[in-house]
Amino acid sequence: MKVAVLRLGHRISRDKRISTHVALVARALGAYKILYSGEKDSGMEESVNNVVRQWGGKFRISYQKSWRHFLKTRKGRIVHLTVYGMPVQDMVNKIKREKKDILVIVGGEKVPWEIYELADYNISVTSQPHSEIAALSIFLDRFFGGQELKKTFPGGSIVVVPQEKGKKIVER
């Protein structure tokens, strides 16, 4: 079962850091790739690719010009993270039991109603306004049951050595 993330409606002038952080959380917490729609942003793609080169793993980023076409032709389950969905704590085990690849959608701009219709699951982390980064973090942690926190990232040139105080980085 693989997890990918789709970031809807990226806007270069407004969302560069947010979309990059969505990608970093997706990578760190178990997704194998992120796709994004909206404005194509080679700078953001290069930032994410640089993290993968330095820190390791096989994470990928790609641009989807038409999220509609992509969603309509995709196999697996679509999980849309939204304030208006069903509680994550009530639904995550059902999603896992299906044992199908999933695409997690996080919004950027106003999410089109069509996303709510195309999604197999509209999932809420809380029924209050919150960050898409936080929602993705909580969903992935619940989905992977904390096992993603033990994930290793082979092939990188930087490795952090856990320390009680201070910082220790080993360069390969």
Image (cartoon, helix red, strand yellow):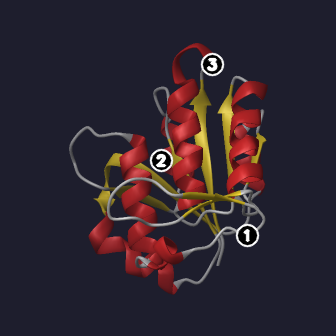
Q: Which mark is residue 62?
A: none
The answer to which of 136 and 103 lies nearer the viewer is: 136
C-beta proximity under 8 Å, tags 2 and 1: no
Of callouts 3 and 1, the N-terminal one? 3
Q: Which numbered disc, 3 or 1, marks the residue closer to the eye?
A: 1
- Pointer 2 with pointer 3, Cβ within 8 A: no
Residue at image position (57%, 67%) is 30
Query: Mark 1: which amino acid?
Result: Pro
Task: Answer above or below: position of 12 versus 81.
Answer: above
Residue to which mark 1 is pinned: 154
Q: Is residue 41 visible?
A: no
Q: CA distance from mark 2 to mark 1?
A: 37 Å
Kindly identify which residue carries mark 3.
12
Task: Locate residue 18, reporting x and y percent.
Answer: 50, 32
Q: Closest to the observer: 161 or 38?
A: 161
Numbered label attached to residue 116? 2
Under tag 3, what secondary structure?
Answer: helix
What is the quadrant of the N terminus in the image? Answer: bottom right
Q: Residue at x 36, y 48 (%)?
A: 134
Q: Is residue 171 above or below residue 146?
A: above
Q: Secondary structure at mark 2?
A: helix
Where does residue 38 sit, x and y in percent of width and height?
A: 66, 27
As shown in the figure, which amino acid type bears the numbered disc 2?
Tyr
Q: Secondary structure at mark 1?
A: loop
Spot occupied by residue 76 in the image (x, y as percentages of width and height):
67, 69
Asked where in the image residue 137 lies, by quadrant, the reply is bottom left
Q: Residues within 10 Å of mark 2 (few under 14, many from 20)?
A: some
